[in-house]
Image: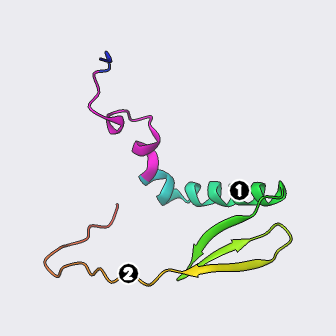
Amino acid sequence: MSDRTKQNDFDDLDSLEAQLPRLIASGELKEAARRAIADQLARGIPVTFQRGEAIVKVYPDGREEILGRVPQRTYRIPPDVTVVEPR
């Protein structure tokens, strides 16, 4: 058994999980993802992602291929549930 005393990674304030809200709110996560995608395309590797309902594969030469479609979610937040926005 590990001598680790933390319950989980969220107890570590330096962990990626603990920093996610800040990274999302500041836009750093989005920019890091865009840099990673650009780097992958520059290396000649296609990128696959979801755009709306479509699953799209973008090739380094700019071609786009629609691989399939994902139906819109049907889940609705129950009326008695309040969504709290981050501060």
Q: Give the image quarter of residue 66.
A: bottom right
Q: Which residues are magenta?
A: 5-20
List the residue tagged with mark 1: 35
For the residue pair 26 and 61, the one nearer the viewer reads as 61
Q: Is residue 37 above or below residue 70?
A: above
**Residue 16 vs residue 54: left or right?**
left
**SS class, disc 1:** helix
The residue at which mark 2 appears reads as 73
Mark 1 vs mark 2, CA separation in Å: 29 Å
Q: Quarter of the image holding residue 17? A: top left
Secondary element at image label 2: loop
Type of amino acid at the residue the image marks with label 1: Arg
Q: Tell me the quarter of the image containing the C terminus.
A: bottom left
Residue 40 in picture, x, y percent from top left: 75, 56
**Residue in view at x 82 percent, y 66 percent:** 60
Q: Is residue 43 magenta?
A: no
Is residue 52 visible from the viewing direction of this image?
A: no
User: Between tags 1 and 2, which lies in front?
Assistant: 2
Question: What is the crowding at mark 1: few (fewer than 14 residues within 10 Å), some, or many (at least 20)?
Answer: few
Q: Residue furthest front?
A: 67
Residue sitting nearer the eye, 35 or 22: 35
- Front residue of 87/36: it is 36
The x and y percentages for residue 3 are: 31, 15
- The reply, left or right, for residue 61 in relation to residue 85 is right
